[in-house]
Amino acid sequence: MDTIDKVKKLVLEGNVLDDQGAWVTLAARKDTEKKIIDRLTGGKVLCNGRWVPIPQAKESGRKEGIEPPQETRSMGKRRAPKIV
């Protein structure tokens, strides 16, 4: 069986690729994504392999001398986009 046939078979069986490129069931992938979204909406981010509150992640970054991305530096100072 060639690669294309293997991929077709896996997809037809309900499998998808995860973040590491391994084949997992669609249900398992949905569960993983739900857990990630729940953590993000709860105010936590992934920092050094651990889910921590955003202020803790910011402080950790400051201690390591890492600046936040430009688009997040002045979130409080931004204006809402104009609706055209």
Image (spheres, rainbow, N blue to C red):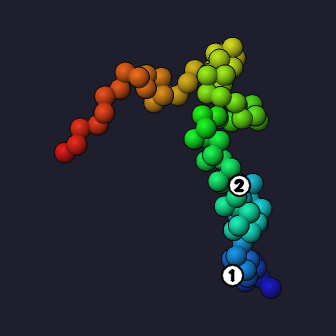
Q: Quadrant of the C terminus?
A: top left
Say the numbered circle drawn on residue 32: 2
Q: Relative to residue 33, is residue 76 drawn left or right?
A: left
- Circles 2 and 1, Cβ within 8 Å, touching? The answer is no
- The local crowd at label 1, few if under 14, some if 14 to 19, many if 20 or more residues have their Cα within 10 Å, is few
Residue behind mark 1: 12
Give the mark toward the camera: 2 or 1.
2
> Eyeballing the image, is 27 above or below 42?
below
Q: Which residue, as the protein is rendered here, is positioned at the far left?
A: 84
Which secondary structure lies at badge 2?
A: helix
- The local crowd at label 2, few if under 14, some if 14 to 19, many if 20 or more residues have their Cα within 10 Å, is few
Q: How many marks?
A: 2
Q: Quadrant of the N terminus?
A: bottom right
Q: Relative to residue 80, is residue 51 drawn left or right?
A: right
Nearest the viewer among 10 and 42 is 42
Q: Amino acid at mark 1?
A: Leu
Q: Amino acid at mark 2?
A: Thr
Q: Which residue, as the protein is rendered here, is positioned at the far right?
A: 1
Upstream in sequence: badge 2 or badge 1: 1
> Eyeballing the image, is 59 above or below 32?
above
Tell me the CA gap for discs 2 and 1.
Answer: 21 Å
Which secondary structure lies at badge 1?
A: helix
Image position, residue 4 (x, y; %): 70, 80
